[in-house]
Amino acid sequence: MTALARPREPGPPPAAREQAGRQIALLFREAPLLLDCGQPVSDVRVAYHTYGTPAEHAILVLHALTGTSAVHEWWPGFLGEGRPLDPTRDYVVCANVLGGCAGTAGPAELPRVGGEDPPLTLRDLARAGRALLEHLGVRRVSLVGASMGGMLAYAWLLECPDLVERAVIIGAPARHSPWAVGLNTAARAAIRAAPGGEGLKVARQIATLSYRSPESFARTQSGWGTRRPGTADITTYLEYQGEKLADRFDERSYLALTGAMDRFQPSDAELRSVQVPVLVVGISSDLLYSPAEVRAYAELLPRGQYRELESPHGHDAFLMDPGPLPEWVTTFSRP
Ligand SMILES: CC(=O)SCCNC(=O)CCNC(=O)[C@H](O)C(C)(C)COP(=O)(O)OP(=O)(O)OC[C@H]1O[C@@H](n2cnc3c(N)ncnc32)[C@H](O)[C@@H]1OP(=O)(O)O
Ligand SMILES: N[C@@H](CCO)C(=O)O
């Protein structure tokens, strides 16, 4: 990998905002975390939020690619009394993933391999999450994950079958298709070609197109010149989304996490070994992970069920147009 600009001190990127209620655990002090690449890592910092009263059973929320542990910020409609993640009856836990940039140890704090950031795997991320659960005294979990969080739920099902009671996987495949790897390849190439933030902006523009749909943008961004004379609204929208991500996210985390998603390639036989009930939700207009692709993985799971969220807004419908999703999560995620 070409050296990326903006070398900085270990820790979250300067732009990362402190979040209310965020807690930090220092894990792997006595026995190191052994990454799948063979590197041991000690003293791993994990940032997390909890909601509700500590209990042996938790609902573990697994966030998407650029997400954080602050579920109340990015999924407010799902968290609260009477909602799917109800702190008056559930113990809800969400941790920023290993390799992320919202408080948990990111690539700059992990050992380099061959002069590069370590090739993290989703199973590494699950093992780091498992250590947090042990730290919190949690013995059984229901998983709720969307997008990268949904792929990470598949990794948890395979890596920690003794802990997982059930899972809700939203808008996620068990393996990345060539299409998904290709989109990430272009995004990473943009970051490497223009390190220091400019490439990350382009990566976000590419990703944003894959997170929505032609109909979604026809409905919301069909104007011209609303923000800048003579310029299509979709152009200024994508530019703005790129700026916003570059302000809050770290390019090395983007490379690490998209790489971890791409290299997660469990076999059909592994997926057929999953013993717990799993609700898999596809999104009707998802261009990144088609509903047919998502459904095919549900059908490999012995106790998989499939439902489809009808929305014109594409992959990000789980954030912007969830429809009946809260009800589905409520009925499925509790023991
Ligand atoms: C599951 C997870 O972990 S996700 C967590 C990490 N990700 C995030 O926190 C971001 C999640 N949010 C999103 O991705 C989006 O907000 C969505 C998909 C939920 C909703 O998308 P949208 O309805 O397009 O709203 P979005 O917030 O992206 O855009 C609105 C912003 O774009 C601006 N905007 C809208 N149209 C234009 C335009 N044509 N040109 C320039 N700017 C524009 C608005 O002024 C607004 O600005 P603001 O953010 O400063 O208030
Ligand atoms: N838009 C969300 C979901 C992408 O999968 C994110 O940025 O994390």
Image (cartoon, helix red, strand yellow):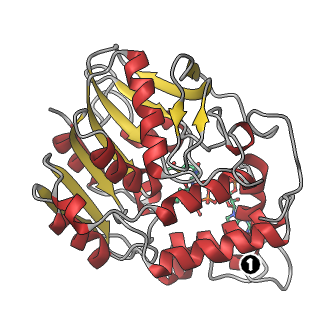
Q: Would you name the residue on which mark 1 appears? A: 235
Q: Residue at x 65, y 32 (%)?
A: 103
User: Which SS class for mark 1?
Assistant: helix
Q: Residue at x 67, y 40 (%)?
A: 106
Ligand 2 appears in which quadrant? bottom right
Nearer-the-camera pick, 282 or 303 = 303
Quadrant of the rendering where the N terminus is positioned: bottom right
Disc 1 residue type?
A: Thr
Q: Is mark 1 within 8 Å of ligand 1?
A: yes
Residue 16 appears in which quarter of the rendering?
top right
Find residue 233 and report its horizontal and vertical position in percent. 71, 77
Nearer-the-camera pick, 30 or 64 = 30
Query: Measured along the vertical axis of the image, is residue 316 above or below residue 314?
Result: above
Find residue 266 and report its horizontal and vertical position in percent. 33, 62
Relative horizontal placement of residue 150, taking residue 230 as reference (left or right): left
Find residue 298 and report its horizontal and vertical position in percent. 20, 64
Relative horizontal placement of residue 320, taking residue 58 as reference (left or right): right
Residue 21 visible: no
